[in-house]
Amino acid sequence: MKKAFYLTTAIDYANGSPHLGHAYEKILADVIIRTKKLNGMPTHFVTGLDEHGQKVQQGADKEGILPKERCDRIAQEFKNLLVTLNISNDDYIRTTEPRHKNVVSSLLQDLFNRGEIYQAEYKGFYSTRAEQFLQEKDKVNGKWPEIYGDVTEITESNYFFKLSKYQDWLIKFLEESDDFIVPSFRKNQVIEFLREPLNDLCISRPKERLAWGIPLPFDKNYVTYVWFDALVNYVTAAGYGNEEFKDLWPADLHVIGKDILAPPHAVYWPIMLKASNLPLPKQILAHGWWMSSGEKMSKSTGEVVDPLSLVEQRGVDAFRYFVMREMTVGQDADFSLERFESRYKTDLGNDLGNLVSRLFHMTATYEKGVVPKVELNEEFEQKIKTNFEAAKEKALEHFNAFQFNQGLEQIFIFIRSINKYADERTPWKLAKSDLSEDRQKLKTCLGVMVESLRLAIQMIAPVMPGVHEKVNQLFGLPACENWKTALEWDFRLEGKTLGEKIILFPRD
């Protein structure tokens, strides 16, 4: 059996409702996985929820409910978001599931048995908000940064993982790996982080301080610390301990936000896998943040965007298009409702929506809905075919390199060229002529436009699967055709009867 392309997102933390950042990461991962499918690859796509930890327990206490009740509610919110955004995940993992608890316990026991975990007393500073111990070097100008919230000094006995033992190995691995971390400049940031000596990682919390967690298999008085719980989800979902594990692991791609690249995903996780004698993931893609007027959107500042409200107003494919068109993967992007509306009205409404509407209308009016045979191959037709070949080459290259905004730009250059072709051929004028030459030009124009639109719709399928499916239904074609066979200029719809025109992007 051919190994599936195994993609994961970061699992969301059960401490609040979904926002724009969550939605973007899921859409980005979904576009990647749909691109792989259209290239003929078997795939497996996992996302989920991180449910343990102090903030979850505190949130439940404030509500007067059990942590599991709170997690159940939040899990449903995130699952609803996946459905709303048309996300094609194959699995949804929750860290409270028995399958995950069993894997965490198995890995921890193995590491403990081999001396990779030890018990020691710790005295230092602790951030409840970040759920991590801090050092003096974490201060900025003598003060704890706002991201850590309230910081208290504590002394307690805990269990530690020998992280520092693998520091030199990890530095060497990263320096020799060209594409383990994408974008490449993030690798340099991780290596810079590793210039400072690593402390061993505290992997536990005493139950008397935190009861909501997976008990350590070798000491039931402690629960597992967040990273040795949350990060393990990736191998749990791959079927660790079962026969199917070899068909999925190692992960081909972890899609995460840049804020959890170092240390969690680029330091803790590779070392945890190395110590556990498991292969490392092939690649980590760290995306940027959504900003508002140059500042990161966050709940604490009140700068959040509810993706569900935008989807309700303008449709899911318009939302998916906007976030993929506006953000260069790996960089930050600025969000504004004005920018969203501009993309909706110009790219989607004027360029794509208008093309679909008028083409189906003209075909129905002039040819009774039947796609005519292309009878000419003049300069106009040669040019539009050349435009397609250029768009196809560049768009697929960009898509396969995760440069989706540039790929979409190439596709919409092609879409605009179809509209320009219609303006130059003027089918509405040709239809009024009684000359046989003009009838030939009319048939050719409509046939070329239908073929061009079919190909454009195929290329935007990963980003706008709903639009792709709707238009393909009108063409009498199945959804999600393999790009290797679908993206051929061959006039395969000749003689087919099209469905009735639709308005893809309604105006107010």
Image (tube, rainbow, N blue to C red):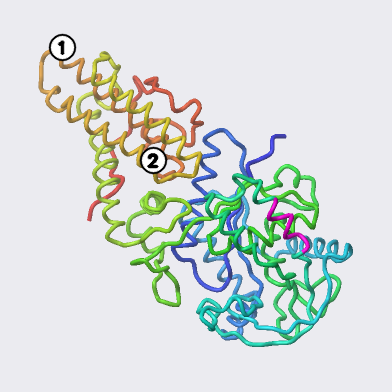
Which comes before the other along the chain, label 2 or label 1?
Answer: 1
Task: Tell me if mark 1 has few (under 14), some (14-19) or many (20+) residues whose alpha carbon lies within 10 angstroms of its own.
Answer: few
Task: Please report the residue visible at 46 percent of the width from the left and 42 percent of the height from the top.
Answer: 462
Tell me if 215 is positioned left or right of 259 in this view.
right
Residue at image coords 21%, 32%: 420
**Label placed on residue 436:** 1
Q: Residues within 10 Å of mark 2 (few under 14, many from 20)?
A: some
86 vs 186, nearest the viewer: 186
Q: Please, is residue 20 above or below residue 452 in the view?
A: below
* Amino acid at the residue labelled 2: Lys
Q: CA distance from mark 2 to mark 1?
A: 34 Å
169 part of magenta stretch:
yes
Helix, strand or loop for disc 2: helix
Nearer to me, 498 or 123: 123
Bounds of the magenta span? 165-172
Q: Which residue is mark 2?
A: 470
Q: Is residue 363 left or right of residue 195?
A: left
